[in-house]
Image (tube, helix red, strand yellow):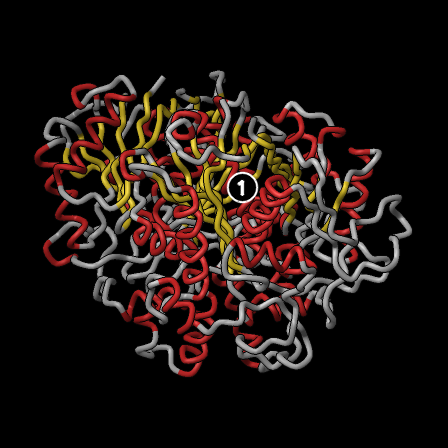
């Protein structure tokens, strides 16, 4: 049974909707710049891919209250766009799920309230804290979307939203649901910025994924969702879905809590599993949207695994050179980009690439490629805890 | 698809560490906060790791390893877990340090353990499991989603699935609960959950893991028939309909059910629904309660899963959990639990 993608929505540092993101991708317009929204002492010294809208502006845009966690504001904007884009007649009559991923939850709120708690463990600020956790974000957005048949939150670090899409597809394939809005969201926080900084894997310049001289990642924020539908729902749509979610796999590197194995065992297994499910061979993949965080460790492990599985590596690039690493949102955002690649026959460049990595035989795409026949795209997402997931999107015939 | 429960592991505020016994003595708490009874972790981790690991990391991981050992499985076919809050104590250790030093120099040790998938992936690391590894973090649906994931995996021909849940009550969460007036006034007795004076909850925590398999083994506790989660029911009628249709979907009916595990907790509003259901729907079943043993936390239904497993295998219901005794033996067991808007049903059948 095929699972179709009927709609998509995205907000990131390179645009507030799908069209703006596509324009930036086409024009090599990176979202990495000086931090101006997140209050942090690193504003001048560490760049990031922030969405340059305040919570008040995002609130106006989303229809939520500006007191709500930034992650939820981003989530609702992208999820709403995805549903509007799907334009499903009688949306309410189907069994619908909202499977959303996030890793920081309401950390932006907690890290502010916690300061008061440290001063006074009985502070009234604690009253605000009660609902905040990863699931709160999902429930708040699900309520606004009017979805209640099946809701849950996945939090497997940077592979979270890939696993959300896979879980949604499995619920459709087993006829438990007809429609699933799946993807993820994460906002910038001091917690994650300082965390990655303490691991010394942040680049103090715009990141250079897959470059021999790469220094690390840039943190980003955003949300990306796809609307997955069953064949039955797809048949009712005026606008026929362009793509299917043809393969996915979740594997674990089981090597180290935060580092990937040098040969990328988990990465290899995830890509292999996704290929097997899709029934495709490596030759069928036209483009790989790499995880490509820009850290020495990730790009080496992923690159080795890509090389081992593909032999001759197809077009490949990391769009994190535009969006930074958006953690729990990245697979959702990159799903939208993968679908855009198929729909528009274009391959996005890997920005700022200069020098080939000495361990690898391949280099990423560095110029926008147009008029390419893109039938199948693989998108990789790997995270802390060795969580490795790959998904494959295919042109719907 | 019913799955056999072939191994269990539970670390909780009670003495649940050893699978050879079944609630040998009940630990009573006179405060409104329960904490897990610590186990001897040197069996599981080296001393260096024990020092670095947060409390939940230790008892969460150990529970998973106990379940695997109990089932006689070295490497599970997949791991799926639920945790509503991830690892709050160690995450806040990192948060505190970055606030204290105003974002200057912080150690990454706590940050590394702060992602919600830390326990699940730590188990994978320890047993060398490269298979599917998932972590759901959705309030009172966290463990429920992991069970749904396990059900999907079984249909996808995966066997010996390690499924579990874990949460801890951090000092911060406890302060929040105190502030929002949910907690029972101290001094109190954890055993007096349902009396007129017992309004308010006791904060709790715990970890419980299970090996779900397609084939019965010598160690099988019983079978997990299925589960269902539903969100924000609008009325008592809707809850009843969910319960009845869930039973029907699993080829069962109310008349088949011998024991109902209720999520009754001391929380007035939620308990009024639970008590009404016990009176109207479950009038012939033995009613069993469990939150006086583990406290209230969002993945406590995993403790109830453990309780169901033990009752099925022992074919015995400990006195301490009996709320209404209708002299039924624990053959077919229904769990109904809720946490705020998250409602959960599970069905078990003794072998």
Residue situated in front as seen by the camera: A296 or A20 = A20
Q: Is residue B259 left or right of residue A135?
A: left
Q: Give the answer, above or below, for where B206 lies relative to A352.
A: above
Q: Give the answer, above or below, for where A130 lies relative to A37.
A: above
Location of residue B116 in the rendering, given as x and y in whole percent from the top left corner:
52, 52
Q: Give the answer, above or below, for where A101 lies relative to B70.
A: below
Instruction: Determine which residue is flagged by label 1.
Output: A163
Residue at position x 51%, y 49% in the image: A155
Residue at position x 77%, y 46% in the image: A301
Is residue B4 among what the camera can see? Answer: yes
Location of residue A307 in the rendering, given as x and y in whole percent from the top left corner:
82, 39
Figure quadrant of the C terminus of chain A:
top right
Q: Is residue A393 left or right of residue A264?
A: left
Q: In the rendered structure, the residue with mark 1 lies on which chain?
A: A
Location of residue B123 in the rendering, given as x and y in whole percent from the top left corner:
59, 42
Residue at position x 64%, y 31% in the image: A274
**Few, some or many C-alpha atoms within 10 Å of disc 1 (few <14, some 14-19, many ≥20)?**
many
Residue at position x 31%, y 33% in the image: A94
Residue situated in front as seen by the camera: A228 or B309 = A228
Location of residue B200 in the rendering, given as x and y in whole percent from the top left corner:
20, 59
Q: Which quadrant holds residue B51?
A: bottom right
**Residue ranking furthest to the front:** A371
Give the SS element for disc 1. helix
Q: Which quadrant holds residue A254?
A: top right
**Residue ranking furthest to the right:** A358
């Amino acid at each position: 049974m095929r699972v179709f993608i009927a709609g998509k929505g995205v907000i990131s540092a390179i645009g507030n909707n799908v069209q703006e993101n596509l324009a930036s991708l086409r024009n090599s317009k990176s979202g990495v710049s000086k931090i101006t929204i997140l209050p942090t002492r690193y504003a001048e010294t560490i760049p990031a891919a922030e969405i340059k809208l305040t919570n008040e502006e995002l609130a106006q845009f989303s229809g939520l209250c500006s007191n709500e966690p930034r992650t939820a504001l981003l989530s609702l904007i992208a999820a709403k766009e995805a549903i509007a884009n799907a334009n499903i007649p009688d949306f309410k009559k189907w069994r619908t799920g909202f499977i959303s991923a996030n890793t920081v939850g309401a950390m932006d709120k907690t890290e502010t309230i916690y300061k008061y708690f440290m001063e006074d463990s009985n502070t009234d600020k604690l009253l605000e804290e009660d609902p905040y956790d990863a699931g709160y974000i999902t429930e708040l957005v699900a309520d606004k979307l009017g979805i209640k048949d099946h809701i849950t939150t996945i939090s497997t670090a940077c592979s979270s939203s890939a696993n959300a899409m896979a879980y949604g597809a499995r619920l459709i394939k087993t006829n438990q649901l007809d429609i699933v809005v799946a993807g993820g969201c994460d906002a910038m926080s001091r917690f994650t910025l300082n965390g990655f900084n303490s691991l010394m894997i942040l680049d103090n310049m715009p990141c250079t994924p897959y470059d021999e001289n790469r220094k690390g990642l840039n943190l980003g924020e955003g949300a990306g969702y796809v609307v997955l539908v069953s064949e039955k729902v797809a048949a009712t749509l005026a606008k026929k879905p362009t793509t299917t979610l043809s393969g996915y796999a979740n594997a674990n590197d089981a090597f180290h809590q935060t580092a990937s194995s040098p040969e990328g065992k988990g990465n290899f297994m995830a890509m292999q599993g996704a290929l097997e499910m899709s029934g495709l061979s490596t030759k069928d993949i036209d483009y790989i949207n790499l995880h490509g965080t820009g850290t020495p460790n990730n790009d080496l492990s992923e690159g080795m695994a890509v090389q081992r599985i593909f032999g001759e590596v197809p077009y490949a690039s990391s769009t994190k050179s535009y969006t930074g690493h958006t953690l729990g949102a990245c697979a959702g955002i990159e799903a939208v980009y993968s679908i855009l690649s198929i729909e528009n026959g274009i391959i996005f460049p890997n920005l700022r690439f200069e020098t080939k990595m000495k361990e690898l035989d391949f280099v990423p795409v560095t110029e926008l490629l147009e008029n390419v026949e893109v039938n199948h795209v693989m998108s990789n997402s790997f995270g802390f805890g060795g969580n490795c997931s790959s998904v494959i999107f295919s042109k719907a015939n | 698809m019913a799955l056999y429960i072939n191994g269990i592991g539970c670390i909780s505020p009670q003495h649940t560490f050893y699978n050879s016994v079944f609630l040998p003595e009940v630990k009573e708490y006179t405060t409104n906060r329960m904490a897990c009874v610590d186990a001897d972790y040197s069996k599981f981790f080296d001393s260096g790791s024990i020092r670095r690991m947060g409390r939940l990391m230790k008892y969460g991981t150990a529970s998973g390893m106990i379940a695997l050992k109990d089932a006689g499985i070295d490497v599970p076919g997949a791991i799926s877990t639920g945790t509503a809050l991830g690892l709050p104590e160690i995450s806040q250790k990192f948060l505190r340090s970055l606030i204290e030093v105003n974002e200057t120099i912080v150690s990454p040790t706590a940050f590394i353990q702060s992602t919600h998938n830390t326990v699940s992936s730590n188990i994978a690391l320890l047993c060398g499991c490269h298979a599917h590894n998932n972590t759901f973090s959705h309030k009172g649906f966290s463990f429920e989603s992991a069970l749904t994931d396990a059900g999907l995996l079984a249909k996808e021909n995966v066997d010996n699935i390690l499924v579990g849940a874990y949460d801890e009550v951090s000092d911060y969460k406890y302060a929040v609960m105190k502030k929002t007036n949910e907690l029972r006034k101290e001094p109190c007795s954890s055993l007096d959950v349902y009396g007129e004076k017992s309004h308010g909850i006791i904060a709790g925590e715990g970890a419980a893991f299970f090996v779900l398999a397609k084939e019965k083994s010598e160690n099988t506790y019983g079978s997990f028939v299925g589960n269902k989660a539903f969100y924000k029911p609008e009325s008592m009628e809707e809850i009843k309909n969910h319960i009845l249709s869930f039973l029907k979907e699993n080829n069962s009916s109310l008349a088949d059910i011998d024991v109902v595990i209720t999520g009754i907790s001391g929380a007035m509003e939620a308990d009024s629904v639970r008590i009404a259901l016990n009176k109207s729907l479950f009038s012939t079943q033995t009613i069993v309660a469990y939150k006086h043993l583990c406290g209230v936390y969002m993945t406590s239904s995993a403790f109830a899963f453990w309780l169901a497993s033990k009752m099925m295998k022992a074919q015995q219901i400990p006195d301490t959990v009996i709320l209404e005794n209708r002299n039924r033996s624990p053959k077919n067991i229904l769990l109904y639990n809720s946490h705020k808007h998250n409602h959960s049903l599970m069905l078990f059948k003794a072998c």
